[in-house]
Image (tube, rainbow, N blue to C red):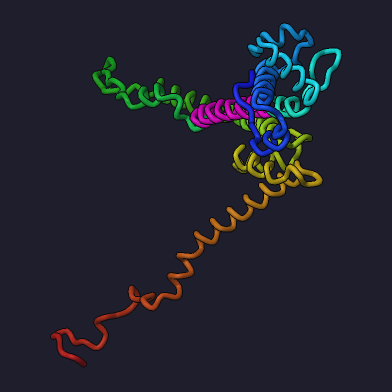
Amino acid sequence: MAINHYPHHIGDFDRSTRHLSRLERSVYRDLMDLYYDSEARLTLDMAALCRRIIARSTAERAAVVQVLGEFFLKTDTGWYHSRCEDEIAAYQANGSQRALAGKASAEARRLKKEQEVASGSATGHAAPLNLVGKSVATPVQRDGNGEATNQNQNQNQNQNQDTHTAAGNQTQAEPSGSARVVSVASSVCMAMKAVGIGSTNTAHPDLLELISKGADIGLFVAAAKGAVKKQNPFAYALGTVKGQMRDAAALAETALAAPQSAAKHTKHAGFSSLNYHEGIEADGSFA
């Protein structure tokens, strides 16, 4: 990915170039722009270099020589600038991380679609033609004696076949769940590496268990960002996600239990069991 912008630290540049002339400061900026644009050290060919930054007059060429000698290091492969090299390396690394994150996101979307298709097949929603066939009434025919006979034998056989087929489809769908978990684990590890986790393990039992329980790639990436500087960042991130899943489950249980507990302690509880006719005679008078 070619560099199309770079950070210009105004204070640093001003302090390091305050002693230069306006021409020399302008030449210095042109040399750095050329360095970033080419992502390479500046050529040792002075005539070609001056031509690239439009330094034509004697004063302009002298400024090029002055700036190169003070701020750049001459090497066998060209004029080297440490700050430019650091910024180029950081830009390229950031671009690689964005590319990895984009691939992981695309893979997660693909796996989600596959999971939806697999879930539909396992529940039988993917076979509407069989359902339509079962809803059609079978014709009634007369035998040789004139008695009516309903031909349900073929229909019953088809229903039995459909039942066995659906069961077979469900059995075949089960292994895809395990394959999905392994595939998601690979995408999760790729995304965690993209944010700075150097060592991951796609077969880690905690990782596979969390994915099977519904943890999505966003949880792992968020946890990874907070674990980069930890001693064992991968294990720390998994522990973070595990704690979040546990807290979410506990909160859900609390929310489900709260209405039942409240009903037991309400002052209106038990009204349905009261006898409102107690003490009143049949004619409406009070006993």
Measured along the vertical axis of the image, is residue 6 above or below residue 55? below
Task: Please name the residue shown 64% across and 39% down the image.
Answer: 221
Could you tell me what secondary structure mostly forms the magenta stretch? Answer: helix
**Name of the residue lying farthest toward the left:** 283
Q: Image point 64% across, 53% down: which residue?
A: 246
The residue nearer to you, when weighing 185 against 181, is: 185
Q: Is residue 120 visible?
A: yes
> Does 65 sit left or right of 91 as displayed?
right
Q: Name the side, left or right, on which 55 lies relative to 68.
A: left
Instruction: Write down the quadrant of residue 220 in the picture.
Output: top right
What residue occupies the far right of the structure in this picture?
Answer: 76
* Residue 178 visible in image: no
172 to 74, vertically: above or below: below
Look at 27% across and 15% down and name the residue there: 144
Q: Which residues are magenta?
A: 93-121
Does the segment drawn in magenta span residue 148?
A: no
Residue 51 image position (x, y, % from top left) = 67, 8
On screen, residue 145 versus residue 81, left or right, reads: left
- For the image shown, how many numbered marks are present on the structure? 0
In-image side of 192 versus 75 (left or right): left
Q: Nearer the viewer, residue 96 or 251?
A: 96
* Image quadrant in which the C terminus is located: bottom left
User: Which image quarter is the N terminus in?
Assistant: top right
Q: Residue furthest front?
A: 58
The image quarter containing residue 78 is top right
User: 194 or 171, which is in the foreground?
Assistant: 194
Residue 194 image point, x, y percent: 69, 32
Q: Horizontal and vertical percent for residue 131?
A: 39, 26
Out of 215 and 78, give the one closest to the viewer.
78
Tell me: residue 224, above or below residue 182. below
Is residue 97 a member of the stretch shown in magenta? Answer: yes
The percent position of residue 205, horizontal first and vertical second, equals: 75, 40
